[in-house]
Amino acid sequence: MQCAWVLACGGLLLALARPVSAVDPPRPLRVVSLNVLHGGFGFRSDGQHLDERLAMVVEGLRGLDVDLIGLQEASSGRRRGDVAGRLAAALGLHYVRAPSGYRWVGRLASWVMGFDEGPAVLSRFPIVSWEVVPVNSCDHWYGRVLLCATLDTPWGPLDACSTHTGSSTCQLRSLTAVLQKRRGRVPLIVTADLNATPDTSGVRHLLASDGLVDSSRVANPDVPGFTVWQPVRTEAPQASRRVDYVLVAPGGEAPVRVGASRVILDRPGRGADGKALWPSDHYGVLSEVEVF
């Protein structure tokens, strides 16, 4: 599926960002994966306190000097606008986004609900090309896709992908097959909400079959790193599973090195009503990786 096809479908958007200065030698890249919780029906601008939560996300990310952000559930609605575009503009990043509901039933559901949602890639570096590849939905009515963007970094091209799958082994095996076709001499970073924990057969197959490195596990082998599920209006932390990942694969002979990884956006703030409000029902993952 080429970018021209996607543009014809009206599903992909791109924003200009601040210019990137040449940097040498290669340095670790700071990569974030975050499911932003789409915000519900699009007939209102602030479903599930979306506007307040996005402000918290911007505040939390602004000081982290992030190079790459992979979003899941990045929505676009009649009243809220394009969430990925709003975050990219606030953070001064390039971006590209694609809706997950590529099948007719998904498009119909998006029309009825007044919004669509899907993965997005936000980058400090220019996006020179992109591709949207369907992932087998495995009899589920809602489509799943892998969005991949090729970035022009000062050290060479980098493939950055974002996806949001179900937990089924079937879907994760389909994702594995899609990623295997992208492997080559260009480094690959995949930010993902897989809805599956590291001990499940689907995730084990993905990591074993495609040479992907789970940055969180490498950096923190004895830390659970829970990311879900966090009700956004409760006081206490409730995450008890890890389903969000920053995965990395080398390009050519260059090895992958993981410097650090931690959960972020894992503290509540206060909503306009004074009650607890979390940035999302997922915590984010921030990893520092070397791929050049």
Image: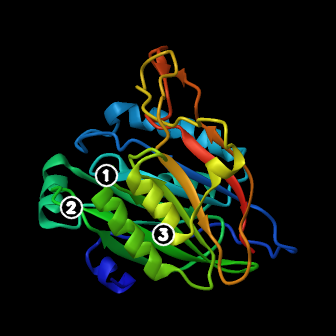
- The residue identified by callout 2 is 138
The picture places residue 87, in percent across and down from the top left corner, at 52, 51
Asked which quadrant contains residue 211, the reply is bottom right
Residue drawn 43% across the image and 34% down it: 281
Q: Amino acid at mark 2?
A: Cys
In the depicted structure, whether residue 55 falls above or below residue 175: above
Instruction: Judge the density around disc 3: few (<14), some (14-19), many (≥20) Cα neighbours within 10 Å.
Output: some
Alpha carbon of mark 3 to alpha carbon of mark 1: how far?
19 Å
Q: Nearer the viewer, residue 220 or 122?
A: 220
Q: Residue extending furthest right?
A: 25
Regarding residue 152, the answer to whether it shows in the image is: yes
Going from the N terminus, do you reach mark 3 or mark 1 first? Answer: 1
- State left or right for residue 39 relative to residue 19: left
> Residue 30 placed where, x, y %?
70, 56
Q: Which of 156 and 227 lies nearest the eye of the viewer?
A: 227
Q: Amino acid at mark 1?
A: Gly
Q: Nearer the viewer, mark 2 or mark 3?
A: 3
Q: Which residue is mark 1?
A: 166
Q: CA distance from mark 1 to mark 2?
A: 9 Å
Q: Residue at x 61, y 75 (%)?
A: 126
Residue in the foreground of this view, choosing between 38 and 246: 246
Cα separation, mark 2 vs mark 3, equals: 20 Å
Do the residues bearing badges 1 and 2 touch, measured as CB atoms within 8 Å?
yes
Looking at the image, which is closer to me, 7 or 2? 2
Q: Any mark on residue 209, and which?
A: 3
Pointer 1 local density, CA inside 10 Å: few below 14, some 14–19, many at least 20: some
* Residue 254 against residue 115 in the figure, above or below: below
Of helix, strand and loop, which one carries label 1? loop
